[in-house]
Image (cartoon, rainbow, N blue to C red):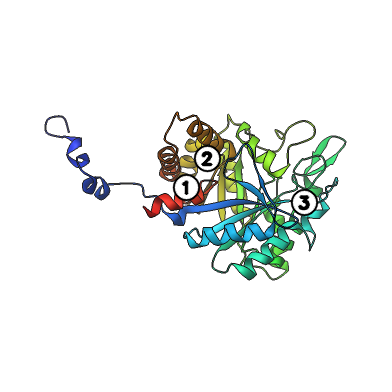
Amino acid sequence: MLFPDYRGRRLRQNEAFRRMVRETRLSVDDLILPLFAIGGKNIKNPIPSMPGHFQLSIDHLLKTVSEARDLGIPSIILFGIPDKKDAFGTRASARDGIVQRAVSAIKDKVPGIAVITDVCLCQYTDHGHCGIVDKGIIDNDPTLDLLASIALSHVKAGADMVAPSDMMDGRVAAIREALDDNGHVNTPIMSYAAKYCSAYYGPFREAAHSAPQFGDRRTYQMDPANSLEAIREVTMDIEEGADIIMVKPALPYLDVICRVRDEIDLPIAAYNVSGEYSMIKAAEQMKWINGAQVMMETLTAIKRAGADMILTYFALEAAKELRK
């Protein structure tokens, strides 16, 4: 088809036509809101690098979760900031841990919204790594039992889904076995399957107090240069029992989301991470961009690449835009 026989502008000339031929549709149903829970009462600590987000005590957390539910957002994902840390992250699986208490409160006070919990050790260890450290090395296999214990404690508290983000080999299988053996065969696992060792996580680490105290996470998180490896990681997690797989971060890895979409038929989540959020917010504050428009274009791009659901700090704002 060549001009003048084909004129692409014919179907762009008014909003009705543009709506009729729109290929990708972003919905509030696609959104998952990440939240940071902290102990105490009446605490709402601003996160400087993430304008509009806070470390929230449970009383304030319930208000934000209620707002999300009322906007039609189907799910939130919880990250905890513990009162104590140690080498083994023991507070991560404690019955009275911050995530466990927050989950219980949400399920009791805010029905009708799904609660996902992040399963990892980095926020809870004094060294900031996602696994047990032995002589400076992240020890994979002994970590698996701890991760399974954390996931089980979250589900016992009422979590609807668990999301292991640690990138230890074999952790999905360990968690699936622990859940099944304890009667939670219907609890789904959303695996951070292709999680890259990214510089885009900086603001999150400030929010969650989870920066590693030595070295980095290159020995367990993926090399940003690799795409084929993502397919191997995703395939392994599916074989171990993952119900949803995730690509993280989203924007720098749209090609990976697309490639995974072509390879598998499970639901795909993509994490629009803190650094992606903060860059847009910073540019908006400088009046260099229209923040709302860039937000919606960004989320649409992630959906267009193949994501079925998007974890995003923009969830509340995007839900309001989608109502207009």
Front residue of 291 and 13? 291
What secondary structure is marked by label 3?
loop
In which quadrant of the rendered image does the N terminus lie?
top left
Front residue of 105 and 260? 105
What secondary structure is marked by label 1?
loop
Callout 3: few (<14), some (14-19), or many (20+) C-alpha neighbours within 10 Å? many
**Amino acid bearing label 2:** Ala
**Between disc 2 and disc 3, whose residue precedes?**
3
Front residue of 145 and 109? 109
Q: Which mark is residue 82?
A: 3
Disc 1 marks which residue? 307
Q: In which quarter of the image is residue 201?
A: top right
Nearest-to-viewer mark from 2 and 3: 3
Mark 1 vs 2: CB contact within 8 A? yes
Q: Distance between the residues labelled 1 and 3?
A: 31 Å
Disc 2 marks which residue? 250
**Amino acid bearing label 1:** Ala
Callout 2: few (<14), some (14-19), or many (20+) C-alpha neighbours within 10 Å? many
